[in-house]
Image: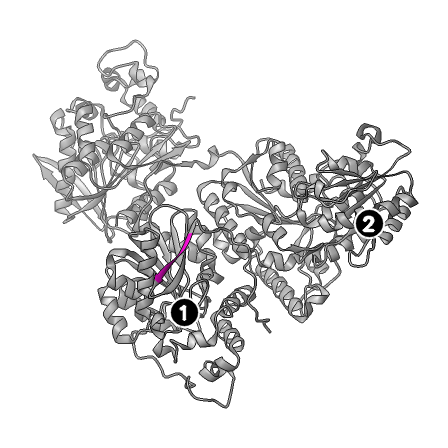
Amino acid sequence: MIVASPAREQTRARYPDEEGFVERDGMRIFWERYGEGEPTILFPPTWELVHSRCWKMQIPYFARHTRVVAFDPPGNGRSDRPRDAAAYERSQVAEYAVAVLDAARVERAIVVSWCDMGDSLILAAEHPERVSGLVFIAPSLPTREREVAEFPFDEELDTDEGWAKENRHYWLRDWPGYVEFFISQMFTEPHSTKQIEDCVGWGLETDAETLLLSFCGWDTKELDPETTVELCGRVRCPALVIHGTADELVEHERARGFASELGGAYVSLEGSGHGPHARDPVKINTLVREFTESLAPPEPKERRWTRALNRRKRALYISSPIGLGHAQRDAAIADELRKLHPDLEIDWLAQHPVTAVLEARGERIHPASAHLANESGHIESESAEHDLHCFQAIRRMDEILLANFMVFDDLVREEQYDLWIGDEAWELDYYLHENPELKRAAYVWLTDFVGWLPMPDGGEREAFLTSDYNAEMIEHIARFPRLRDRAVFVGNREDVVPDSFGAELPLIRDWTEQHFDFAGYVTGFDPTQLGDRAELGYGDEERVCIVTVGGSGVGEHLLRRVIESFPAAKERVPELRMIVVAGPRIDPASLPQHEGLELRAYVHDLYRHLAACDLAVVQGGLTTSMELTASRRPFLYFPLRHHFEQNFHVRHRLGRYGAGRAMDFETATPELIAEAIAQEIGREVDYRPVERDGAARAAALIGELL
Amino acid sequence: MDRRMAVELTAAAPEQTRARYPDNSGYIERDGVRVYYEVYGSGEPTVLLLPTWSLFHSRHWKMQIPYLARHHRVVTFDGRGNGRSDRPREAAAYGEREFAADALAVMDATETERAVVVGFSAGGERGLLLAAEHPERVDGAAFIGPAFAGGGTPLPERTVFDFDTEYETHEGWAKHNRAYWLRDYRDWVEFFVSTIFTEPHSTKPIEDGVGWALETDAETLIATMDAPALTPEESQGLCRRVRCPVLVIFGEQDAITSVSRGAAFAEQTGGELVVLEGSGHAPHIRDPVKVNLLIREFLESVA
């Protein structure tokens, strides 16, 4: 079921401001510090099966408000893997925590632990002056004699089924098998594929030999009941214990018993498993924040509240930065909305490159936008040669999406809006459905495609994953139909792909028709007002071919390939004038040059040039290809490899319009490209016309909510 | 805008059905003046809802009591001069310290060792006295549109006429005048209560307020005006002595006292200021949900 391999670390939402090692007995422990301000929050390690990345959903949020320190356990992450069992003792880990606090110049901290087996409890009992509060998530600290394990850890067994995998001999035989099994027990919630993959990946960064040094069954790893009770009696600081009712590793009675020995508050999360900080991060972040604020109330400051009828009408527009197309269409929709509601104020929660477009138009970018973690940079970092595995790139963005949702949630706790509009704002839509009580305004969801689709070479695993993501989305909408007050599809019914969401799931088009309104396509301009060649400097006798890959750096390989085709194309089309637009991320000087070929870094109002050209050569993105369709230009498009949206959704839509000629980067030699250029350039097209009222229709659907 | 009453009100209007009735009530007596108190609910900390100017009695807390009493023990009393309390005629009986002493006597009578005090308007200085001089009895103090002499500036329209001079005109704040009260108390009451509620659509709060004001009379209120008030220096000195958490809630459209007074009060007591945009002088009546939530949040932060 799970492909077990340690993965390259995904882009973080936030990187440490300081990092280092503390050394004890020749052994090095790696630590990180993020952010500034009091109180400090310390996230200590848990079992060395995972390392400090297990706090990835907490660190960016808390570091925005206060100082955060985390460290890797001995035996995993960037800490050493000592061969000495004593280095892994619970009391030793508590001493590492003290050393890390010293190194980070932290006097006292609130300690937030996951599945504590004693380290944090010892730290608080032995060093009360260093700990001002304790949060235990799913603590594994027995206050009564634990039951004897079903299978003896040390003996050779005649089965590998279930918990029989928790066995010395099995570990040495099939460590990945155990890690997969154990982690799957940790996340009992449906649709936890990403959390499981993450933890399995971390588990494979260490090995059976390392863990065996200090493990011979849980009773050898955790504190015994007598010690636990004795230490609990010595803890003087406030404490909070959080436990999921679907935790298969730590039973309810154990967590409850521990909380009552400790005299701490107890929060029970119904339906949550053993890792709620990873699976229900919004709730955990909120609970921990409330706890830290109860210990150290923030400085009193002036607050304001406005009487309902004194409030101005305000909308918060969250525009996805993945692809520039959203910026133009969202601005067009905002203009139409203002026509319907002249008193409407629109704030934008957005980041580069969307903000560049918005700022040029004088739109109000909310200052909280500065806290958003960079999404487009992550997407670029996930790309290879004309290749972007878009589904995996978005999955590997979970930390960034959550960090950005927390920015949104902080903002709307402070400020009142009548309406939230999310254009492919995945973080907003996903985490609202996971935390429906956080909805405080009317909410509109906009998208131009529905359904994650697997690429054929992803095999069974990717088909399983995309259908699991689709199933979760379908369940979200079915269970909480009140969350999306409007769901607007930017396009028409027939633009929706005819595929299925996955095995035993509905057809995408049927489901979308039931759950969406259709605005038609939204262009950011009126194509009939464009296309004056003379004004743009193009002669009637010239055959103008514009090559562009948009604003990202992903397209460099395509540019090089097309440039290579120039001499052959020029030979076939002597009037050819080829203009290659490198865009902001590619240095035109780094590209090969041919005589007669024009290389430009940037073209102002590129869409006007595209509307006037005789041929365009582009990637398979929706916005540019639909602009060309609307202005009825011939074009060659090269969908990025592994980009399911470009390969399936956009291609389907362009097919319906009879627009463009799809090219395969894999097989398109310069010769083939030159031939296609010669065949397509200047050709009269018979595309299906693109509607011009999409923005107005979208605005009408949205405006009803104001 | 003319906000005067279109309806006929009489002081004899029967009290409307309450959402909650007291669990216990009684009188304390000081220097022959009987003061009526009520106790509701249970739960720590106890909330003491202080009397405001004797224009109103304790029913002005009607939007708070039923909610707070579901979570806390609530004690309130009618300030001398209105409600079921006595209406002495001599000014000395209405000094700020008399109200503070009544509060302590009510706390003693109800076996309330400590409380979070909440005051509205004139209740501000009473609360300030209690918090500054009896820190062992007060865990926190919340104020709504508090009267405060120790800082900020008065509203300009309130500096035009004084209380004791007789004027030709009876327009606006010229009504706020000893001679006019004796001539047409009812007209001044309607003007003043309408000025408390600057928010549109406030007919019910205005009717309630006018009704409470008609339960006392001009002579009684004149006695309160002649009573010794705290000087600015006294108020500032008291602020410096406050050690408990303080919350000040102020409506930005307050037309009785200026928001700058509230800001100064919060600053001098080291308290938190919450400004309600669009609210008038009595948001606990006109925006009761928001004020109840703010008070609850404050109670939870104190305890």
Q: Residue at x 34, y 37 (%)?
A: A301
Q: Is residue A29 above or below residue A332?
A: below
Q: Is residue A621 above or below residue A160?
A: above
The answer to whether residue A686 is seen in the rendering is: no
x%, y% of residue A308?
46, 37
Q: How far apart are marks 2 and 1 (CA)?
A: 56 Å
Q: Is residue B111 above or below residue B14?
A: below
The answer to whether residue A190 is seen in the rendering is: yes
Q: Residue at x 79, y 32 (%)?
A: A529
What crowding class fits label 1: few (fewer than 14 Cα within 10 Å), some (14-19), or many (20 or more)?
some
First to last magenta residue range: A19-23
| Chain at numbered mark 1 | A
State whether discs 2 and 1 lie on one chain.
yes
In front of the other: A271 or A403: A403
In front of the other: A583 or B166: A583
In the picture, measured across the screen, residue B71 lies left or right of residue A640, that is left
In the picture, measured across the screen, residue A614 lies left or right of residue B149, that is right
x%, y% of residue B117?
23, 41
Colour mode? one colour
Q: Does the magenta portion include A582? A: no
x%, y% of residue B300?
30, 49
In front of the other: B222 or A423: A423
Q: Residue at x 34, y 43 (%)?
A: B294
Q: Which mark is residue A134?
A: none
Residue carrying label 1: A47
By secondary structure, the bulk of the magenta-drawn segment is best described as strand
Amino acid at the residue labelled 2: Tyr
What is the secondary structure assignment of the residue under circle 2? helix
What crowding class fits label 2: few (fewer than 14 Cα within 10 Å), some (14-19), or many (20 or more)?
some
Q: In this view, does A190 lie above or below A238?
A: below
